[in-house]
Amino acid sequence: MKLAFIGIGNVGFALADNLQKKGHDIVIAHDDVNSSSVRKAKEKNPNFRALPLQEAVSGSNLVFLATPFGINQSVLEPLQFHGKILIDCTNPVGAGISHGLESKISGAEKVQEWAPDAKVVKSYTIYGYENLMNANFPNYNVKPVMLIAGNDVEAKKQVLPLNSDMGFETLDVGDLSQALHLEHMTLLWVKMVRANGHHPNFTWAYLEQ
Ligand SMILES: NC(=O)c1ccc[n+]([C@@H]2O[C@H](COP(=O)([O-])OP(=O)(O)OC[C@H]3O[C@@H](n4cnc5c(N)ncnc54)[C@H](OP(=O)(O)O)[C@@H]3O)[C@@H](O)[C@H]2O)c1
């Protein structure tokens, strides 16, 4: 698949590099194609190309958003998605590792407001970038789970093979309003790992009887 990445920092690079190695074509979407993160990403993976935002979005099958949450409105509002899937990997994080929108609405629903002609799916936020780089746990016979949320069932189905390529089991947790709870899971992960010293490669699994 042709995948466009808006944001190629910790999260964007981890996903893009992982997916490129599974055979996907990666295009970095940035109006400054010489920005420091774009240059660094292309040095680390010379298979990446970079194009201006709208051109990269228009030429892709699916778009990843992996930017600081605070810039999302200004990045998204000028863009045309024409019904494309936009995977929201961003998190609104406030002071003291709190929810940046005071838990009143999910960041993903705001992303949908700012990109009304996209089909937004929330994914890849419940872990740090470390698990997105490498989701293989060879000593276990269960796979790590990736929780996704979105209003469009068909759009969520398109995300499933990408998760499988990276080694994740997918669990669809419901519509986009559920993203608020995924964003709280992120805060849990961040507090556990970045503040309390848990291992950054620990993972969640889904077991059902
Ligand atoms: N870090 C984690 O472990 C983690 C895990 C899950 C979710 N998240 C969430 O994922 C998002 C990204 O986090 P990160 O740690 O990857 O951040 P990061 O390393 O700072 O990367 C941010 C990326 O956004 C790009 N960017 C900024 N303005 C842009 C614009 N106008 N157009 C296109 N690209 C632009 C930056 O490019 P330039 O700076 O080169 O312009 C950079 O490539 C955040 O919302 C974060 O909350 C983070």
Image (spheres, rainbow, N blue to C red):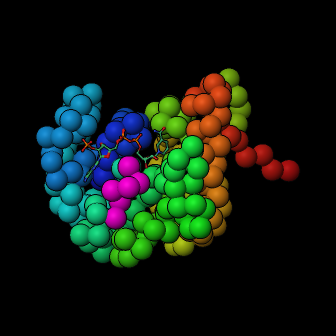
Give the residue at x 21% y 57%.
Answer: 53
In the displayed orientation, state which residue is furthest to the front. Answer: 95
The vertical placement of 45 against 207, above or below, is above
Picture quadrant of residue 8:
top left
The residue segment tinted magenta is: 68-73
Residue 48, horizontal then vertical, whole percent: 23, 39
Residue 28 in percent (x, y) is at 25, 47
Q: Nearer the viewer, residue 185 or 130?
A: 185
Residue 193 position (above or below residue 27): above
Q: Residue 170: percent from the left, percent from the top?
A: 61, 52
Q: Is residue 161 visible?
A: no
Q: Would you place residue 65 above or below residue 198 in this image? A: below
Q: Quadrant of ligand 1?
A: top left
Q: Nearer the viewer, residue 110 or 122?
A: 110
Which residue is at 32% across, 47% downward?
7
Residue 34 in the image: above or below residue 85 = above
Residue under the point 44% across and 57% down: 88
